[in-house]
Image (spheres, rainbow, N blue to C red):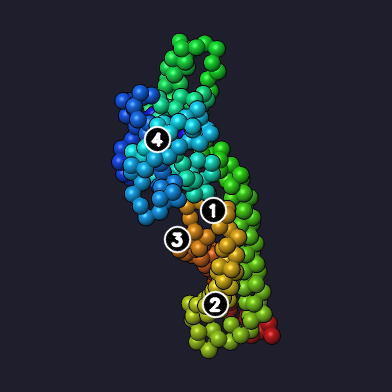
Amino acid sequence: MVADEGYFETLRIPLLAGRSFEAADNADRQHVVVVNRAFAELAWPGDEPLGKRVTGGGMDSYWDQPDAWATVVGVVGDVRHDDLTREGRPTVFFSHRQRADRARSGAILARTTGDAGQMFALLRQTARDIDADVPVRFLLFDDVVARSLGDRRFLAEVLGSFAAMGLLLAALGIYGGVAYTVALRTREVGIRMALGSSPGEVLGMVLRESMTTVGIGVAVGFAGALALSSVMTSFLYAVSPMDPVAVGLTAVLLLMVAAVASFIPARRAATIDPLITMRSD
């Protein structure tokens, strides 16, 4: 790749060692390069990369000129160029002033704290002043990132929709199961209350039993998620499939939904009149 002295600062790529390009790095001076950490670790593992020399091979017109080999003057952090889910690949950055053959096409990067539209208009006019026949296209960096994540975002939305449906079905199933159990145990609940159990004790009994079952289900689901975590790794970025925060919040959400779904029939059981129950039998 080719870059100028403001490239790394514009993209906020950290300088780890040495220096970046300078305006004085022109074609008349010793050619220099900046490499990323991945390239330095691949080419010179355990060694100091600064001062080493590299060549661009057959990628430009300097490959057969020994005195045009470039000296490493800086090391920068790795950048995910193609896909945010892939680690940064080994990269060598040449100065565009020294390797103009590599800069026949490319992009101009700019950063602003103001209105991006005004900056686009200024850059468009500048390009027209230089050459009116050169086509110019502008993209916001956020749009570029969003486009690269489009497929994964769509998949996440689909999976999120299925998860929401699953949560709703789970709530309905818990409600129906607890309501059915309470209906079968109406006589038992009536006898308990006739013998002195308070509505709060009956409510607690029903909730404990239902939440115990839900807790077992959450544990089984956690084990299944752990077994399938390797499958989900390829769909995630900058987060682990078993991220403690995400897993914890999911478990809490499931327990809260289950508690609400169980509370309604449990409360109904706590309001049972023992006399009516005994008479109905």
| The disc label shown at residue 251, or none | none
- Counting residues from the start of the chain, the first of labels 2 and 3 encountered is 2
Q: Does dot 4 land on a helix, a strand or a loop? A: strand
Q: Does dot 1 land on a helix, a strand or a loop? A: loop
Q: Which residue is mark 2?
A: 212
Q: Amino acid at mark 2?
A: Thr
Q: Nearer the viewer, residue 86 or 33?
A: 33
Q: Write down the quadrant of residue 25 in the picture.
A: top left
Q: Is residue 48 above or below residue 56?
A: below
Q: Amino acid at mark 4?
A: Ala
| The disc label shown at residue 70, or none | 4
Q: Nearer the viewer, mark 2 or mark 3?
A: 3
Instruction: Find out whether the residues at labels 4 and 1 contact each other: C-beta distance under 8 Å.
Output: no
**For the residues marked 4 and 1, what is the alpha-carbon distance in whole angstroms?**
38 Å
Decide if residue 126 is in sight here: yes
Q: Nearer the viewer, residue 149 or 193?
A: 149
**For the residues marked 2 and 3, what is the alpha-carbon distance in whole angstroms?**
23 Å
**For the residues marked 2 and 1, what is the alpha-carbon distance in whole angstroms?**
32 Å
Q: Does dot 3 land on a helix, a strand or a loop? A: helix
Q: Is residue 72 above or below residue 140?
A: below
* Residue at image location 35% in from the left, 23% down from the top: 28
Q: Which residue is mark 3?
A: 245
